[in-house]
Amino acid sequence: MSRGESLVEDLKVMLNNPRFSDVKIKCSDYKDNNDILHGCRMILAARCEVFEELLFNEMRETDKIFFPEISTVAMKVALEFIYTGTVDENNLNTTNVIDVYYAANYLLLSALEEVTFSFIERILSSNIKTSIVKLFSAMITKFDVQEFKESRLFQLLCKKMMKIPLGTLAFEEISFDVLKVLLSQTLDQDEYFATSEYGVFRYVVLWGANKVSTQALAAYVKILPPDDSVEAFCDERIQKNEELIEESKYRPQILKQIDHLLPLIDLQLINMKILALIIDPLKLHSVECLIKAYRFHAISNIPTKTTRGSLVNRKITWDETKCGPHLIVNDDGTIVQSLARNNSQMAIAKQAFKGEDILQWDIVIEKNTKYVAIGVISYTEIEKPEPKLSKSLVWQPNCWCISSDGSYHDLTSSREYELEAFEEGDTVTTHLDMSKRTLSFSINGRKMETAFRNIADKVYPAISLTSLGKLRIKSLSRPEEKLSTDFKPDYDDMLNAILSRLLI
């Protein structure tokens, strides 16, 4: 292309070209003259207010500018944008995009901020765990969290980090600062956190032990079982009347690593049995912290949630890989429907529920069908056979459900339920109490008696429908919680009674 045909192409020729430049720019990683960037004073000042202020006021007598907080790579992208109004996204990646965003923010280039923010959003949409952690770590390193925590970039990355179970992250991936910021900024968040509070405690302690030595890590792995086996671990201790044997020789070194992280763990969200049989004997928390948690459990007349954040309005979506062959799921994952005339087939949600929470969600009958079943199912691909998706929910092993003919079904039986048949437009609410392992239902707000007891400790929402049916699943909610104020117990007597029952 000849000169004069394209302004953008002509400006690219001038970009970082000493022949057309009268300003030299050094950045934070400057080592020698090869790292010097070149710019035109008039173009820089006309296109960027920060450069104008520097070049015509503070540094009007010099041709050198130093940016101690902006990297050379980030400045190159910023200069490209200043000169041409565009960015070659081939120059952006997970390693440098936070630096570029910082440079755009520093230079008050709002349009470049938008470009980099959109690029970050596209990276995050792939939900690649390593990319999310890398971007979050880079952001914490680059920005002052206290000043930046209200920004949309921080909120976006923080929400993405909350959805990654801590137990899936290698200890080497996470720095102290990353853990501290993540835990401090999510302690009172309304967003759902993917790790139970006991899981947070376990990860923090093992992270600290890993910092001490491989021997310390091995010792604490033995006495801190993962979420899915912690209850069995506690029950075994009670049955055998065994106390937890802790490797106290490592405690001072581990405390040195995690002392400032422990206050960011909410012990009130941890099951009292786990507190008494696992956490208390470790002597990592102060007696005052433990007593406060015990007392909270003693005066609460409702089962406490076990995860920080809120389940309110958490989106439930159908798993496209766990749907019958003639069922389809819409783009946002909330609607499942059958477009063909077929026998009853089932769909399972992506989200599993366990722990001790009390949850409820709605299924709306948007298009009536001959037969609908609504409930939950439990399965693990290793231990139990996978559900037969081409069959009705009522015929699945380990299911608990009601059907549109007013009956309810589990693994062993099928019985009538005091519920009228579902009709188009009806809303069926599933009420799940994981603390009591019970399941009940209501239709259009009228709640029925408990349908099932002793359900599995991990379940997925599930439905089945026949030809031309269409169902929508709506967001989770949680019944309103209140602490009992009808009595004022003797805290010490109650605490002693609780501990004595646990340790019998």
Image (spheres, rainbow, N blue to C red):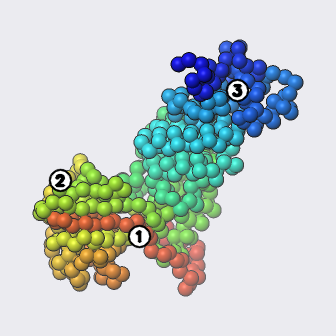
Q: Secondary structure at mark 2?
A: loop
Query: Can residue 248 be seen in this snapshot?
Result: no
Q: Is residue 289 above or below residue 154?
A: below
* Residue found 50% across the figure and 47% down from its top: 161
Q: Is residue 406 left or right of residue 80?
A: left
> Is the residue marked by circle 1 packed among few (<14), some (14-19), or many (20+) residues within 10 Å?
many
Residue 1 point in image, percent of width and height: 53, 19
Judging by the rendered image, the residue that carries numbered circle 2 is 325
Q: Quadrant of the C terminus?
A: bottom left
Give the CA separation, mark 3 to mark 1.
Answer: 52 Å
Q: Secondary structure at mark 3?
A: loop
Residue type of the residue flagged with mark 3: Ser
Give me the disc on residue 28: 3
Residue 70 point in image, percent of width and height: 68, 31
Residue type of the residue flagged with mark 1: Ile
Q: Is residue 364 above or below residue 278?
A: below
Residue 68 point in image, percent of width and height: 74, 29
Residue type of the residue flagged with mark 2: Pro
Q: Quadrant of residue 454?
A: bottom left
* Residue found 23% across the figure and 77% down from its top: 422
Label 1 or label 2, whichever lies nearer to me, is 2
* Residue found 51% across the figure and 39% down from its top: 119
Give me the disc on residue 358: 1
- Earlier along the polypeptide chain: callout 3 or callout 1? 3
> Is the residue marked by circle 2 packed among few (<14), some (14-19), or many (20+) residues within 10 Å?
some
> Is the residue marked by circle 3 packed among few (<14), some (14-19), or many (20+) residues within 10 Å?
few
- Earlier along the polypeptide chain: callout 2 or callout 3? 3
Q: Are marks 3 and 1 in contact (CB under 8 Å)?
A: no
